[in-house]
Amino acid sequence: MEWTKAETPPEMNHCDFGWMSSTKVLVCEVGGEMRVATYEQIDEDCEPRWYSACSERWGLDRVTHWMSLPEAPNA
């Protein structure tokens, strides 16, 4: 897996909540902090943006790169 610059975001599809969202990916922010996030467009009038995948769902404004998450291990 390779890092992709945030200027080239992941593909978005309609999600269960009715807006456009990517699958969960790993993002790297300025300073090197990494977290799981999604790229979403909540409304047609809004610009897409990054959101943390945690329960607080923070808006992330400092994402520099992203990559797909690895496959889950077989049990």
Image (cartoon, grey):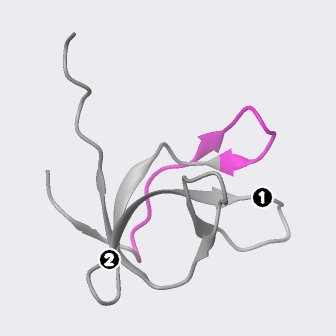
Question: Which numbered disc covers residue 42?
Answer: 1
Q: Which residues are magenta?
A: 7-20
Circle 2 residues within 10 Å: few <14, some 14–19, many ≥20: few
Circle 1 residues within 10 Å: few <14, some 14–19, many ≥20: some
Residue drawn at x 65%, y 60% is 57
Residue 27 lies left or right of residue 47; in this view the side is left
Amino acid type at mark 1:
Ile
Asked whether 17 falls inside the magenta stretch, the response is: yes
Name of the residue lying farthest toward the bottom = 31
Main SS, magenta residues: loop
The percent coordinates of residue 39 (x first, y second) are 55, 59
Residue 23 lies left or right of residue 67; in this view the side is right
Residue 65 lies left or right of residue 21; in this view the side is left
- Residue that mark 2 sits on: 33
Asked whether 54 falls inside the magenta stretch, the response is: no
Which residue occupies the foreground of this view, 16 or 37?
Answer: 37
Q: Quadrant of residue 16?
A: top right
